[in-house]
Amino acid sequence: MTVGQDLRRTARRECGPLWSALRAPLAARGPRAVPLTLASVALTGLLQVVQNRSWGYGPVQTLGAVRADDPLGAALLRTPLSLFVPALDLPVWGALAQMLVVFGVAEVCLGRWRTLLIAYAATLAGTLYARIGIAAGPDAFLGLPASDARIVDTGPSAAVVALAVCVCWAYRAWITGAVVIAAMAAEAVLKDNLAGREHLAAIAAALLLCAARALRGGQGLEGGSGARSGAPPIRS
């Protein structure tokens, strides 16, 4: 067997089940298969436009910006909207493209409600980690400097990372999942900023959710868009 054949075989094993799960719902329903994704992308785009206006920055920050030095109650109330508030210092089109692809795949393959649950769990994990890390201090393992207390949380990127990991777990795309985790670990080491650490917290939350479902007897998190995904049964 040639190297090319080996690579094709690996690619089919890695991506085949996921592609099978996506193909039928998207072919049959098109955009109607991913209403949560389209609404999320639209809301994120709208908030980006609004927060870049002089009259809109304040309200968006008040309602959806979460910082570690905010009162915990206020931070928890803002967390649902913070998922859709993109970072001001990053290109919004990249964030929207990531959301469209990863949220869309997750909505079809994992189901709408599981996608939302994982996204919010990842966002909350990042928020809580920032508080714990700052309280521990920069000298502690995974601790953070006090200056990070005024930095706004990551927005949709933590949810995107967590959903990618959960989809890879559910469809046994181990190589892709390992690449995602390795990339986020490298980001945390090279940039050493709050966003990179929060991405690792989101990955940890995603892996805990996957492991919890596996321990309860589920083969993964796959659930389909609202009903069945069309994916073949997946065996360990």
Image: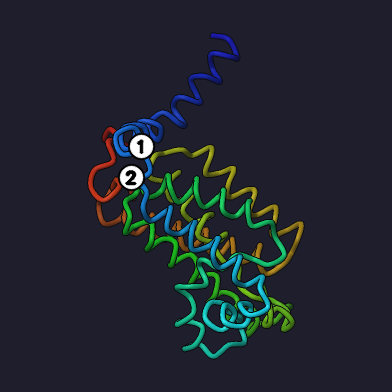
Q: How is the image coloured?
A: rainbow
Q: Are marks 1 and 2 in contact (CB under 8 Å)?
A: yes
Residue at the limit of the structure toward the top, as seen here? 1
- Give me the residue at 48% from left, 76% from top: 79
Q: Nearer the viewer, residue 95 or 4?
A: 95
Q: Residues within 10 Å of mark 1 (few under 14, many from 20)?
A: some
Q: Which quarter of the rendered picture does the C terminus lie within?
A: top left
Quarter holding residue 195: bottom right
Residue for badge 1: 26
Residue 154: percent from left, percent from top: 60, 67
Residue for badge 2: 33
- Give me the residue at 55% from left, 68% from top: 47
Residue 18: percent from left, percent from top: 40, 35
- Give me the residue at 57% from left, 66% from top: 155
- Give me the residue at 70% from left, 60% from top: 90
Viewer can see residue 71: yes
